[in-house]
Amino acid sequence: MADNYSITLDIKRYDPDTKKTWFQSYKLDAGRILRFVDLFRRINNEQDPSLAWGSSCEHGQCGSCAVRVNGKPLLACELLVENAVKDFGTTKFRVEPISIAPVVRDLVVDLEKAYEKVHRAKPYLIKRAPLPPQSSYYQLSPKEIERYEDATRCINCFSCADACISSHKNFIGPNAAMASIVRLMDPREEEKEERLKLLYSEEGIYRCHSSKACSFVCPKEIDVAHFIALAKEGAFRGDNGE
Ligand code: SF4
Ligand code: FES
């Protein structure tokens, strides 16, 4: 493994003032453990302060740095130069914004717009089930939690939505569907009907083509397709999924 690589980033640019889109090439000598967010920052500092990109936590926890690299959606704060070279077999990378919402500028997309679908799925308890008698809290058994705890690792990076092959513009998308499915599996949620109505509606899970691209790209290694498959099999109709 080399210590340094000569990297070329072909980055998709978008100028909202002129509405112009183009690819701009940047060359960098980069240490092997630099991350792609570090490369973007170096471009800003050393070559082009006008390049716009997004990040917040830079620890794989907020989802705001998702971009497409050579066609694959991933987190720019988790992608090390050495892993990118190894995984893609090249030192030349095409970097584009993810496709789930309109581009604001360069690699920055309108996350407010993207979150509209998640908000429609109501990723919280709509109506709390009554607390057990003489108790001030819910106690979930390890078995109950095990059924859906993987899905609670979702950071809404929208990589799964970007990779999704469903072309139907109304499809709520894998992460939003999963957010609702999780609450169907959650014994603390009493409002099942509203959730089922959304999941089996025109914008629901039957728009999914079961390609499993969502599971393949998820940086949190959540088997998103598994949760959607459970709903497709009708696992939540009539009870809470048992
Ligand atoms: S399921 Fe995975 S890929 Fe999809 S939004 Fe959540 S963390 Fe990102
Ligand atoms: S910046 Fe938060 S996940 Fe990358």
Image (spheres, grey):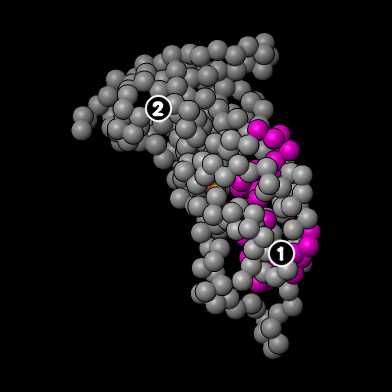
* Mark 1 and mark 2: Cα distance apart in space: 48 Å
Instruction: Please tell me whether mark 1 sits on a helix, a strand or a loop.
Output: loop
Q: Which residue is mark 2?
A: 39
Instruction: Kindly give the residue lying farthest to the bottom in the view shown.
Output: 134
Residue 119 visible within the image: no
Nearest to the observer: residue 95 or residue 161:
161
Residue at 56% x, 31% y: name it.
98
Q: Which three-letter amino acid code belongs to the residue tagged 1?
A: Arg
Residue 70 percent across, percent down from the top left: 44, 26
Residue at 56% x, 63% y: name it.
148
Q: Is residue 59 left or right of residue 149?
A: left
Quadrant position of the N terminus in the picture: top left
Q: Which residue is mark 1?
A: 237
Please tell me whether residue 184 belongs to the stretch shown in magenta: yes
Work out whether mark 1 precedes mark 2 in sequence or the reverse, and give the earlier one.
Answer: 2
Instruction: Kindly give the residue lying farthest to the front in the view shown.
Output: 233
The answer to whether the beta carbon of the residue marked 2 is less than 8 Å from any atom of ligand 2 is no
The range drawn in magenta is: 167-195
Q: Is residue 32 left or right of residue 220?
A: left
Residue 196 percent across, percent down from the top left: 74, 58
Nearest to the observer: residue 99 or residue 242:
242
Residue 138 percent across, percent down from the top left: 64, 77
Residue 170 percent across, percent down from the top left: 73, 38
Q: Residues within 10 Å of mark 1 (few under 14, many from 20)?
A: few
Q: Quadrant of residue 85?
A: top left
Q: Is residue 159 left or right of residue 133?
A: left
